[in-house]
Image (tube, grey):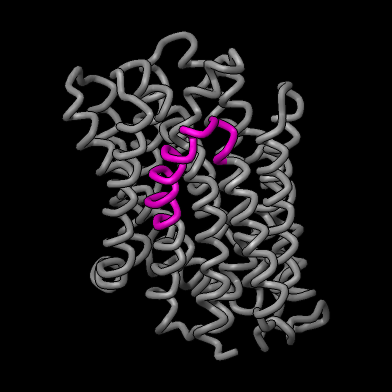
Amino acid sequence: MHKKSSMYLVISNLFLVFLGAGLVIPILPALKEQMNFTGTTMGMMISIFAFAELVASPITGALSDKYGRKKLIALGMLVFAFSQFLFGISEVKSWFYVSRALGGIAAAMVMPAVTAYVADVTTLKERTKAMGIVSAAISGGFIIGPGIGGFIAQFGIRVPFYFAAILSLLGFILTLTMLKEPQRAEMHHENDPEAISMMKILKNPMFGALFVIILISSFGLQAFESIYSIMSSINFGFSSGEIAMIVTVSGALALFFQLFLFDKIISRIGEIGLIQLTFFVSAIFIAAIAFTKSNLVVIFSTFIVFLAFDLFRPAVTTYLSKHAGHAQGAINGLNSAFTSFGNILGPIAAGALFDFNHVFPYYVSAVILLFTGFLSLLLSKGNLNTAIKN
């Protein structure tokens, strides 16, 4: 299989995973009501996913460097399929938690390995556009997923989980039968003198600073995202269909930017500049949602916030992949781990704050992202490039 075809195949796996994730977004409020779960419980489900991903990501990222991308991607798709099926049949809180933990482990297998695979088969010049396509696959899943999920949920609110399991199983079969291991990944052995250990990466002051910013920002982002469907339903009276439409349009906007404008934006202001911009923009519009009483302001602000999030993530991934060298899996694993660590605390805090006051999660999210924006200004593009190369 040609390397470009292989790249699109692994990206399609990512699309299937996030399509599966998008399917369930519109039915979360109904599930919460059916199971009589609190906001804290719903937040815990997201945090357990993130905790499992946190623990597994550094390990799976390094394993993909050592043993290859294909094995990790295929196994991750299989585990994700099982986790979705288990969620669909669960009737007690503990099994929902087990399902989410398995989903986090699956994500830790798929995400770093797919990102590393794309880096393996692209040049530095091609990397920005390729990472934009990776992010577009994620956004595309969220565009189509909620619409399909809202329709399928008419046959039962658990049906979208079974459908997601089938899609993931399809991805597993395609990976196992069609995907070829990239040559670069096959050359990465533990004795490779060019390989970079995780400790060496973390000890690099500027690399470490970027990971800290990723961690803090992930907390703020998840404080917004994890509670959005419930908040918009309770605070503003949006129906499941309206939530699905908002998320779908947000995804379409992000998809357009990622496919056609992302590489142009990077060429003008660079990855670090875009990261800084997204922090300030998201903080301002999350604050607008927290203070407004207008549904139109909420909808418009949601579009802007989700767009900022969907540009922040590929900017970080692109920057890290350009400086990862032979440690693509390890660095992308660390990226997922630090992201997951913030994701653990964000939903728990958001759920608890939501139970206390329905707008408090957004106050906290806006303040954290504003703080992270100012912190990111300390990152000098020139100094960061030098520090990583040394």
Residue range (magenta): 139-160
Residue 156 percent coordinates (x, y): 54, 31
Q: Quadrant of residue 224?
A: top left
Viewer-side residue, 65 vs 301: 301
Q: Is residue 198 above or below residue 378?
A: below
Q: Is residue 200 visible?
A: no
| Quadrant, the C terminus | bottom right
Q: Does the magenta run of residues contain 90?
A: no
Q: Label the magenta part by its dominant secondary structure.
A: helix
Residue furthest to the top: 356
Q: Is residue 349 above or below residue 380?
A: above
Residue furthest to the right: 191
Relative to 103, is 148 on the left or the right? left
Q: Is residue 175 above or below residue 370?
A: below
Q: Does the magenta run of residues contain 158?
A: yes
Q: Residue at x 47, y 8 (%)?
A: 356
Q: Quadrant of residue 98?
A: top right
Q: Residue at x 48, y 73 (%)?
A: 386
Residue 302 percent coordinates (x, y): 28, 37
Residue 384 percent coordinates (x, y): 45, 65
| Quadrant, the N terminus | bottom right
Residue 84 percent coordinates (x, y): 66, 43
Q: Is residue 87 above or below residue 143?
A: above
Viewer-side residue, 166 vs 266: 166
Viewer-side residue, 70 vs 372: 70
